[in-house]
Image (cartoon, rainbow, N blue to C red):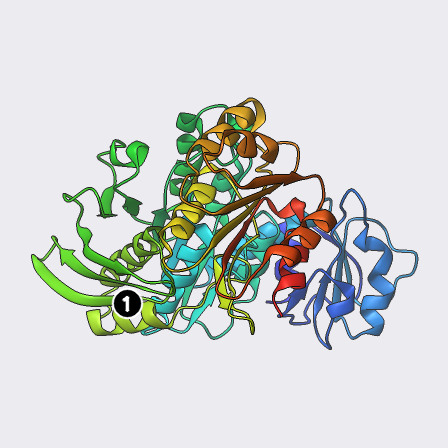
Amino acid sequence: MKIADILKVTSGKLICGDENIEVENFEKDNRCIKDGDVFVAIKGENFDGNKFYKEAIKSGAKLCILSEMPEEKIGNIVLVEDTIKAISQIAEYKRSLYDIPVVAVTGSVGKTSTKDIIASVMSQKYNVLKTEGNLNNNIGLPFTILRLKNENAIVVEMGMNHFGEISALSKIAKPTLAVITNIGTAHIGNLGTRENILKAKLEILDGLQGNNIVINNDNDLLSNWKDIKYNVITYGIKNKDSMYVAEDIESSETKSIFNLVDNKINVKENDIEVPISGEHFVLNALCAIAVGRYFDISIEDIKKGIKEFKLTKNRMDIFETKSNVLVINDTYNANYDSMKAAIEYLEKIEKRRKIAVLGDMLELGSYSEELHKKIGECIENIDILITIGENAKIINDNAKVSNKVHYNNNEETIKEIKSILKSGDAILLKASNSMKFSEIVDKIKD
């Protein structure tokens, strides 16, 4: 696009430079600027990108988009009222130039892993652009759209903390297919009830092009949701009335294999392999099958895409150390549903001593004590429980295991783990991201 296009969609002002210059790559970190990039100065609570426009220009920025008048009029500079709003406007404009499949994924838990497996399946037919990591907010999603070059399909993740956020993202991405993985308790402290969480997730439909939506039919709120305006594509394990159903699931430490019942065309497909164990990853695979079939991808290519998919770092990252310890690194984030699923995965592991290292689940508001207690009550079939944090103490107090200990910080926990860890153990690490459990993983992974 040209600078003139940016001026038009943002109602910005050209402070200096040539509006006919073409630009392509957008970057918000001046340290990552390459020759020809557009530098977008994001202003946050603890930093102000406007202060670094000169450094960006020195590094080769062709254009700087600022929200404050620059000290010097050098290079090409566009002034806008709000750079975060502007980047959304530019991304929405760029999206409008393409007539390609766009899959948008949201849900209380499993968004990132579902996005990853859908992208892997779709890559068997398309050149896919996908959300990197979990950059799923009002900054991450626009920058994802703006990375679009030669790709002919997009898979984006949409997250939220409050009402209105997914609606705004959906209107930028304009998905041609919407996916909702589940409605759980993540962010219930902000939204109050699961019904409100459902309402917030359904904002994904606000920018939907067409009327097709994929839902997890095993989830109570989703399976009961009805709206005649939409063509609902369902998948599930427990709900046998779903269009796509998994049967005869066999799981080991590192993978799951299941048979698919395709009720849409009344056929059965055997031996679909998911390279990560756990029922929740079987559900993710079913979701990817539903998306793949919607885009007429062959079942052979769908199976290949599922088998080859790679998880985003720190999300059920399962590996074995040199001393034969199985590490289940699920440290990126935690809520009731994902914590329960991770514990269930650990409990099903056979022939290994099972150790769970659990920390606080955040953003639960007045539900925090209740949900931490429920997690504790579901812990039975593990050998050692280690908890860290004020809220995680509630997990410890309610767990039905005899060998359990609680610590207040990661340093104490690392010492304890190193003193008890033995060859052949399986250890799960799970907490909200701000608990910094990745520090613990780094100390035990060698």
Residue 251: tell me if it is visible. Answer: yes
Quadrant holding the N terminus: bottom right
Q: Which residue is mark 1?
A: 273
Of 199 and 86, which appears nearest the observer? 199
Of 359 and 186, which appears nearest the observer? 359
Q: Amino acid at mark 1?
A: Glu
What is the residue that sits farthest to the right in this orientation?
71
Left or right: 154 as drawn, with respect to 24: left
Left or right: 235 as drawn, with respect to 330: left
What is the residue that sits farthest to the bottom in this orientation?
35
Q: Residue at x 47, y 43 (%)?
A: 339
User: In this rendering, is residue 169 above or below 55?
Assistant: above
Q: Quadrant of residue 17?
A: bottom right
Residue 289 percent across, percent down from the top left: 26, 60
Residue 150 percent across, percent down from the top left: 47, 75
Callout 1 secondary element? strand
Q: Residue at x 47, y 67 (%)?
A: 129
What is the residue that sits farthest to the left in this orientation?
266
Number of disc labels: 1
Q: Quadrant of residue 269?
A: bottom left
- Binning the other alpha carbons within 10 Å of mark 1 as few (below 14), some (14 to 19) or many (20 upward) gives many
Of 344 and 48, which appears nearest the observer? 344
Left or right: 172 as drawn, with respect to 408: left
Residue 211: tell me if it is visible. Answer: no
Residue 306 percent across, percent down from the top left: 32, 67
Q: Residue at x 55, y 25 (%)?
A: 369
Q: Quadrant of residue 8?
A: bottom right
Quadrant holding the C terminus: bottom right
Q: Residue at x 63, y 63 (%)?
A: 444
